[in-house]
Amino acid sequence: MCTAQDVNCASGLRAPRRAGIGGPAGGCGTRNQTLPVAGPPPRKAPVKRILLVIMLLLVAAPALCQAPVVLKTTEFGRGSTIVLVHDFGGTRTQWLPTAKRMLSKYRVVMVDLPGHGESPMPDPFSLDAAAASLAQVVAKQKGDSTIVVGHGLGGMVALIAASKNPASMKGVVVIDGWTKNPQEIPEQMQKYFLQMLDTNYDAFLKQMFMMQGRDSTEGKTLHAYAVQVPPANIKAYLRQLLNADASGALKGLKPKLLYIGTEKHWPADKKWADLQITLGYAGAAAMESRRIGNTGPLVASQQPDSLASVLDDFAARSIASKTSPTVIMPASNVK
C-alpha cells in the first residue's frame, strides 16, 4: 500500500530523518521503497456508442416530426380532378349538390378539413398543419389536371398548400375567402374574445354563425353544421385566425387563381378592384374573379348549377393552359 512517506517523496517533499527506515536519514531511500499505486486509467469515452446513438437519432428524426393527419374524403367520377374543401364549421357533404353536377366530366374529391367531420385534428394545430394534410390529398391526384376549390377558410388552406406544392395542381379557386383580416385586432380585444369563447361558448358560437347567414334560416343551417365540430377544434381554429395572414402565399403563386364572390360578401355595387384590396389579394400577380348573385355561404346547395358552370369553365382553361395569365381578368357576374 502507499505510505505517507511515499506520497511525500513523489511530491518532492522531504520527510523528517528516522533511522532504519528507508535509506539515508533525512532523504527518500530507494531500497524496499513502495511505489505509489496508480488509480485506474481514465475511461475513454464510448465513441462508437455515441456515434451509434447519433446515427439512430438521424434516422428516426423524420418519424419524430409529426406527420400530417390523414383527411377523410369522398371520391367519385372520372376525368380531371376537382378537390372541394368546405368552410370553417362545415363538412364535405355540403358540396354534394354541386359535385353531382360535375360527375359527368370530372373526378370529384370532397374533403373534410382537419378537426371537422371525420377528419382528425392535428396536435399541435396550425393552419400550416392543415395545409400539409390537404397537400397529402392533392398529391394523390395528377398535378397537371387537378383544381383545388376552397370555400372560406378552406380557400385560405388551399392557398397555403398551393404555395408550398405548386406542381401538385393547375389552379386554385377561393370562394368568399380572405387572406388576412382587413383590420388588425388589438391584443386586448383578442384576449376578451378568447375569454368570451371559453366562458360562453354555446351562445358565442350561435351568434357567430347566425351572423354569417343572409337570414335567420341560413344562419340556423350554418350553426347546425358548426355544433357538430368539437368545441376544442373550433377554439383552436379561431385562435389561429385572429392573426392569420396567408397573403404571402400569393407571391409567385404558380397555379392559376380564381376568386368567386357571392352576394353575401360581394355586394352588387362593389367593384372587384376595391374588394381585392379589402380581402388581401392585392399581392396576386394574376387573378380572375367571378360573382354569383342571389346566394351566400350555402352557394354549393343554393346555386349548384351556376357554381358548377364557373368551376367547369375555369378548370377547362387552367388545365389546357401551359402558362399562367399575366394580367388580372375582369370580374363577371353569374346571376
Image (spheres, helix red, strand yellow):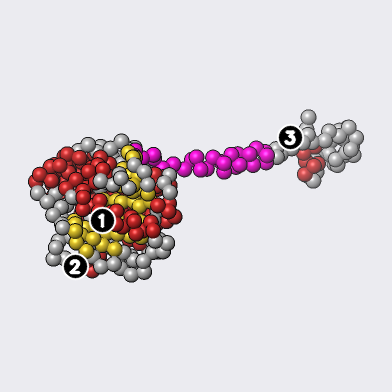
The image quadrant where one finds the N terminus is top right
Spatial separation of the CA atoms under disc 3 and disc 2:
86 Å
Number of the front mark, 3 or 1:
1
Choose mark 3 or mark 2, whichever is in front: 2
Residue 115 in picture, x, y percent from top left: 30, 40
Residue linked to disc 3: 40
Which SS class for mark 2? loop
170 to the left or right of 20 = left
* Type of the residue with mark 1: Val
Q: Helix or strand or loop: what does disc 3 sit on?
A: loop
- Tag 1 residue: 310
Q: Amino acid at mark 3?
A: Pro
Name the residue located 36 percent from the left edge and 58 percent from the top edge. 318
Give the CA separation, mark 2 to mark 1: 19 Å
Residue at the spot 25% in from the left edge and 56% down from the top edge: 310
Q: Toward the viewer: 5 or 108?
A: 108
| Disc 2 and disc 1 in contact, CB within 8 angstroms | no
- For the image, the number of numbered tags is 3
Q: CA distance from mark 3 to mark 1?
A: 83 Å
Q: Amino acid at mark 2?
A: Lys
Tell me: residue 310, above or below residue 64. Answer: below
The residue positioned 61% from the left and 42% from the top of the image is 55
Label 1 SS? helix
Labels 3 and 2: the sequence-earlier one? 3
Quarter of the image for residue 28 reads top right
Residue 81, horizontal then vertical, whole percent: 36, 48
Q: Which residues are magenta?
A: 46-73
The first of marks 3 and 1 along the sequence is: 3
Looking at the magenta stretch, what is its main secondary structure? Answer: helix
Image quadrant occupied by the C terminus = bottom left
Query: Which residue has dot 2 on it?
Result: 271
